[in-house]
Image (cartoon, rainbow, N blue to C red):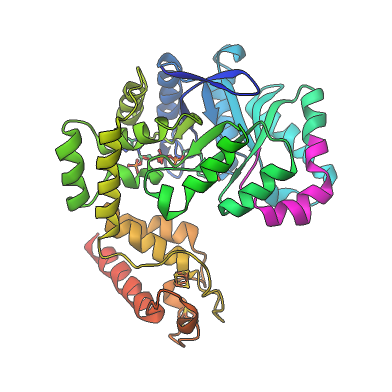
Amino acid sequence: MEKRRMQKIFEEVSLLGFGCMRLPQKNGAIDYEAAEKLVDMALEGGITYFDTAYYYHDQTSESFLGKALTARHPRDQYTIATKLPLSVVQEADDLERVLDLQLKRLNTSYVDFYLCHGLSADAYFNKFKPMGVEAFLKRMVKAGKIRYYGFSTHDKPEGLKQLIDDAEWDFVQIQLNYLDWTELDAKTAYQHLVDKDIPVVVMEPVRGGGLANLADGPRQLLERRFGGQSAASIALRWVGSLPGVKVVLSGMTEPYQMEENLDTFSPFVPLTEADKLAVANIVTALKSLPVIPCTACNYCNVCPNDISIPRIFARYNNYVMFERPEELIAPYERFIGEGHRAEDCEACGICVPFCPQSIDIPGWMQRVVEKREEIRQER
Ligand SMILES: NC(=O)c1ccc[n+]([C@@H]2O[C@H](COP(=O)([O-])OP(=O)(O)OC[C@H]3O[C@@H](n4cnc5c(N)ncnc54)[C@H](OP(=O)(O)O)[C@@H]3O)[C@@H](O)[C@H]2O)c1
Ligand code: SF4
Ligand code: SF4
């Protein structure tokens, strides 16, 4: 297993980390036996970084690790990352109370990597900085309850820059993969972190599974260059080839995924310049599919019904690029709240003049509704 040293804090970690957000499930809960096997496979394969969060699996992912990992394996053989659930913190006194609950769930006296979960510049400057979150984190390091602290974020690169300019963070977790390098401008976010010498932890390297399952055209390009290697392994190697990246978190659900991903990192072989060029061509092919040209700029955020326009379009585009009809069913319903879905668009057209891409927003909403219906009927 490739290991990398996190600069500044000198902690050595496995380049592949186990993301415990997509553990196998049975009857709507974590399938303990199957998930425990994955934990054991991870440790045997050299993974030392386990990432969880307060919220994952309806708040059961941490206690799962408390049983399957900390209760069964010596605590000095791995590191645990978990996250401060920002939405449950209302006042400063909540901070330590929540961390103590997490330690209890995790069955441990300390967390190695503690992250503010999904921090945005807006939330930080308006709520958590005035609340004294940085002083709290420093106090917890001194108390031995956490070893290092950072944040995960889906904010734009400008927001990320404000966060890293304002406080000292030991590491930062961002969404990074070969498609979001340009789609979400992850390139700029990554560069901001590298410029400040902050270790980068990557989430969604396979874009939540999408890059494991490409549509026909891009898949053929991938096979031509990388014949015999899986699309998931190329996505992981692309991310791991960035020197600033210290941990690549993958949420592995099936034993074959764990096995394959362990192989990809043991030993890790970075992509060559020619390989990277081939991946750039795959990105071009993905973008040339009949996707909605939405850039998620959010200028259309004027809808009287508060329809989640860019989120709906992102799910539709995932469906097209990754040939994943389920994108428009389960993730759609998970990420887009009731009352804010395509089904709730009244075709009033108010949003249309605000769109710099001249997208026929109500027309596409109708198409999404029809597509969802079609997929449901095919099941
Ligand atoms: N802090 C945050 O805001 C935040 C947000 C997102 C994620 N995270 C963390 O980051 C971790 C990683 O993100 P992620 O789970 O989205 O990672 P990911 O690796 O991009 O996606 C995981 C999915 O990719 C597919 N996959 C992985 N390896 C594969 C293989 N070898 N072959 C085929 N398919 C493969 C599987 O999808 P299928 O089983 O569907 O095929 C798997 O469920 C999460 O688990 C979580 O711990 C944090
Ligand atoms: S057309 Fe639909 S999405 Fe646009 S503003 Fe009207 S209701 Fe909202
Ligand atoms: S204004 Fe247009 S491009 Fe921007 S988020 Fe809305 S639909 Fe997408």
Give x and y (percent) for residue 226: 20, 34
Q: Quadrant of the C terminus?
A: bottom left
Q: Residue furthest bottom?
A: 348
The foreground one among 290 and 335 is 290
Q: Is residue 289 left or right of residue 330?
A: left
Q: Is residue 230 left or right of residue 46?
A: left
Can residue 66 be seen here? The reply is no
Question: Magenta segment: does it hold 131?
Answer: yes
Q: Is residue 62 left or right of residue 277?
A: right
Q: Is residue 124 left or right of residue 372?
A: right
Q: Quadrant of residue 320?
A: bottom left
Q: Quadrant of residue 104?
A: top right
Q: Is residue 161 above or below residue 308?
A: above
Residue at image location 81% in from the left, 24% down from the top: 142
Report the magenta stretch's main SS: helix
Residue at image location 60% in from the left, 12% down from the top: 76
The foreground one among 51 and 123 is 123
Residue at image location 47% in from the left, 57% down from the top: 334
Residue at image location 50% in from the left, 80% down from the top: 354
Q: Quadrant of residue 238?
A: top left
Can residue 203 be seen here? The reply is yes
The foreground one among 313 and 217 is 217
Give x and y (percent) for residue 101: 72, 34
The foreground one among 375 and 205 is 205
Question: Magenta segment: does it hold 375?
Answer: no
Q: Quadrant of the N terminus?
A: top left
Give the number of callouts.
Answer: 0
Q: Is residue 21 above or below residue 1?
A: below
The part of the chain drawn in magenta is 115-136
Give x and y (percent) for residue 163: 68, 46
